[in-house]
Amino acid sequence: MEFKLQELLTPMTVSRIANVHYFEFTNEYQTIDDSHNFCELLYVDKGSICVYSEHYSGILSNNQLIIHRANETHSLKCNENISPHVIIIGFECDSEALDAFSRYPVTLLPSHRKMLADIMKEGVNVFAPPYDIPNTLEMKKRTIYPFAAEQMLKLNLESFLISIVRDREQLLSATSAEAPNNQMLSEICKYVAEHYTEKILLDNICFLFGTNKTTLCQSFKSEYGITLLAYIDQLKIKEAQKLLLEQKLSITDIAEKLGFNSIHYFSRHFKKHTGMAPSEYILHSTSR
């Protein structure tokens, strides 16, 4: 009698891991636009951050996750009153099933958070510290670690990714089933991210989402540690930096595109946030 062995399909395979980080960012910390040829898992363990990417720009709150796809331009900015704790894992995986997680954050369930913690524990077994240095090009492996720790790290990460794909609908339901106030704030963030280049008035947002300015401003600041107007400013300045570096539009055109009344107001506003006038920013960035 001859037994026939069956090949096992592996649609979710992590081929290599770039980094396993746990950051306690300082408030107002921010990164420049970055892209690389591997995926990046971004999870907020405490607090909140502003995320900017090709597929999603908005706030990532406590217990929420997003996965930037390979070669996707992205960056983050911490709010002025919050020092968030953030997990970042860089890994190679070409499964299209992860694409959905680059478009909108999901709130992890306790079971998924436990799996993520197991990944971090195994990551510490494999990689030597430090784990909180931004832009580490090569994390060094430990010379001695538990048996098959690298394989366990790979398997734990693959198991986690398979789990969130399987539970995607439940995760989306958990995210939308937050307290009504939080759900409204998430919808406002999405609306602002889609319309921030236009003239946005608080009165208009209040009308669209059935609230009032006092409730909106207090709730937004309480939830995200930043005012709604400051959040809109961050989106505009981030887009301005991108457009200035592209050098396809004049400074006047950029000011108009982002809804500023005049180039002078735009220049003052830009310098207030970046410490440089738009023309200085171009020279500084292109000379590096």
Image: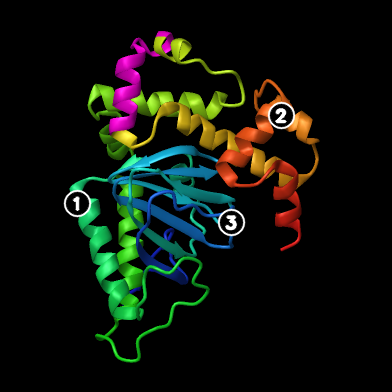
Considering depth in this image, is 76 or 275 the residue closer to the camera?
275
Instruction: Report x, y in % for residue 142.
Output: 35, 86
Instruction: List x then y, in percent, for residue 222.
Output: 28, 32
Q: Nearer the viewer, residue 156 or 7?
A: 156
- The answer to whether residue 152 is seen in the rendering is no
Label of residue 97 in the image: none
Query: Which residue is labeled 2 in the image?
Result: 264
Sequence-wise, the earlier of marks 3 and 2 is: 3
Q: Nearer the viewer, mark 2 or mark 1?
A: 2
Query: Which residues lie in the magenta part?
Result: 207-222
What residue type is disc 3 on? Asp
Q: Judge left or right: residue 150 versus residue 208.
A: left
Report the Cα–Cα distance between label 2 and label 1. Answer: 52 Å
**Residue 104 is inside the magenta segment:** no
Q: Secondary structure at mark 3?
A: loop
Which numbered mark, 3 or 2, is in the foreground of this view?
Answer: 2
For label 3, the residue is 34
Residue drawn at x 54%, y 27% is: 194
Residue drawn at x 69%, y 43% as measured from the top left: 277
Residue 274: x and y, percent? Answer: 59, 45
Check disc 1 and report its element: helix, strand or loop: helix
Instruction: Return the disc, 2 or 1, that comes first in the chain's sequence.
Output: 1
Identity of the residue furthest to the bottom in this view: 143
Q: Residues within 10 Å of mark 1 (few under 14, many from 20)?
A: few
Residue, disc 1: 111
Residue type of the residue flagged with mark 1:
Ser
State the CA–CA distance, disc 3 to disc 1. Answer: 31 Å
What is the distance, in whole Å, between disc 3 and disc 2 at their CAs? 30 Å
| Res. 252 in view | yes
Picture coordinates of residue 106 (x, y %)? Answer: 35, 41
- What is the three-letter code of the residue carrying label 2? His
